Image (tube, grey):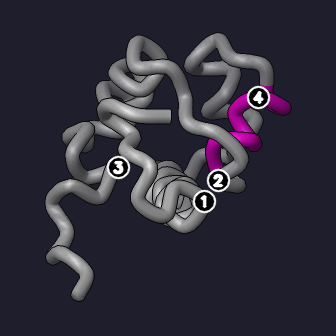
Amino acid sequence: MGGLYADRGEKRDKAAFGRRLRKARERLHISAEGFAKLLRLDPHRYRHYERGDSYPPIPVLKVICAQLGVPMATLLGADQEPRT
């Protein structure tokens, strides 16, 4: 997959995305199932995102970020220090 989710260690990046997503959700003290319902997503699909199995589509990612109150760059790790 190219573009926004460039193929640089994509599996590792998905896992890191999932960890950031879970931490942001947990700061709101809401369960994964409850958050999925809030987003009108299937809880099983949402859990794939938190496990790092897949990325959400961009429109879904925008809604997730809005509900969490975090910039998209934060969830995607774009505001992190580059790895050397």
Q: Nearer the viewer, mark 2 or mark 4?
A: 2
Q: Position of residue 38 (x, y in %)?
A: 59, 20
- Residue type at mark 3 is Leu
Q: Is residue 46 left or right of residue 17?
A: right
- The local crowd at label 3, few if under 14, some if 14 to 19, many if 20 or more residues have their Cα within 10 Å, is many
Tell me the element at label 1. Answer: helix
Q: Position of residue 28 (x, y in %)?
A: 46, 50
Tell me the element at label 4. Answer: helix
- Residue type at mark 4 is Arg
- Residue type at mark 1 is Lys
Please give the residue where the numbered disc 1 appears in the rendered image.
Answer: 11
User: Where is residue 42, by image quadrant?
Assistant: top right
| Dot 2 or dot 4, earlier in sequence | 4
State whether residue 24 appears in this view.
no
Please give the residue where the numbered disc 4 appears in the rendered image.
Answer: 45
Q: Is residue 59 left or right of residue 42?
A: left
How far apart, in angstroms, are the residues tagged by discs 1 and 2?
A: 8 Å
User: Where is residue 70, by image quadrant?
Assistant: top left
Q: Nearer the viewer, residue 69 or 61?
A: 61
Q: Position of residue 79 (x, y in %)?
A: 15, 60
The C terminus: image quadrant: bottom left
How far apart, in angstroms, are the residues tagged by discs 3 and 2?
A: 12 Å
Q: Position of residue 47 (x, y in %)?
A: 75, 42
Q: Nearer the viewer, residue 13 or 69?
A: 13
Magenta-colored span: 43-50
Res. 52 mark:
2
Predominant secondary structure, magenta span? helix
Measuring 38% from the left and 28% from the top, which residue is drawn there? 67
Q: Is residue 71 left or right of residue 77?
A: left
| Dot 1 or dot 2, earlier in sequence | 1
